[in-house]
Amino acid sequence: MAVFALVYCFLLGGVTGLRSMSGPALVCWGIHLGWLTVAGSPLLFLGNPISLAAFSVLAVGELIGDKLPQIPNRIDPGPLVVRMVFGGMSGWALALSGHAPVVAGVACAAVGAVAGAFAGFHIRRAITRKGAKDFVVAMVEDLIAVGGGIFLISRHLT
């Protein structure tokens, strides 16, 4: 079962690579809904209603902000590090909840965040260069990030 938890960590990291706030927001919701448990860990703050609200607002803001031209590329050093950190934190929660090694869960999620960021960046750029509207491609990417994240969190029952 721990291997599946690590695969889920990698995949949630990939989702976080697409939208950096999606991983933490979805983990907060997973804890809130009882799908994940982080009891007795430093991540307990993610179950707090304030964290739930804050990460949810940040995630919605990112979904809106992603469509703006002045937003830096996700593969630039700063945004990439943020994705790795939030991906790793999200992987930590999944690893705890799935009884997998925490260090491995954090590492899998951080690597997944880098993979998701680069894959999302290059796929989006390739599709828009072929004539697709960036806004439409970004909306599809939003659906993949949010829908995929919900699927992962909801299926990762303790």
Image (cartoon, helix red, strand yellow):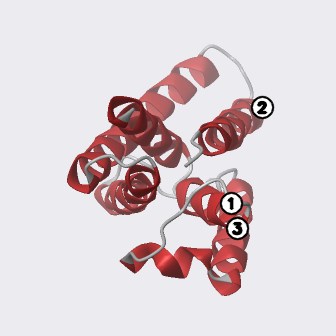
Structural distance between the alpha carbons of marks 2 and 1: 34 Å
Q: Quadrant of the N terminus?
A: top left
Residue holding disc 2: 136
Q: Residues within 10 Å of mark 1 (few under 14, many from 20)?
A: few
Going 58% across and 57% down the picture, which residue do you hit?
36
Q: From the viewer's perspective, is 124 left or right of 43? A: right
Q: Position of residue 128 (x, y in %)?
A: 62, 24
Which mark is in front, 2 or 1?
1
Towards the viewer: 125 or 94: 94
Between disc 3 and disc 2, the foreground one is 3
Classify mark 3: helix, strand or loop.
helix
Alpha carbons under labels 1 and 3: distance apart: 6 Å
Residue 134, position as x, y percentages in the image = 69, 34
Please identify the quarter of the rendering in which residue 68 is found: bottom right
Find residue 151 and report its image quarter.
top right
Residue contact at pointers 1 and 3, CB within 8 angstroms: yes
Relative depth, front residue between 96 and 62: 96
Asked which quadrant contains residue 124, the reply is top right
CA separation in Å, label 3 and label 2: 31 Å
**Is residue 70 visible in the rendered structure shown here?**
no
Residue at disc 2, secondary structure:
helix
Q: Nearer the viewer, residue 18 or 22?
A: 22
The mark found on residue 89 in the picture is: none
Give the residue displayed 39% in from the left and 57% down from the top: 96
Q: Which residue does the numbered mark 1 point to in the structure image?
A: 34
- Residue 136 visible, this angle: yes
Residue picked out by circle 3: 32
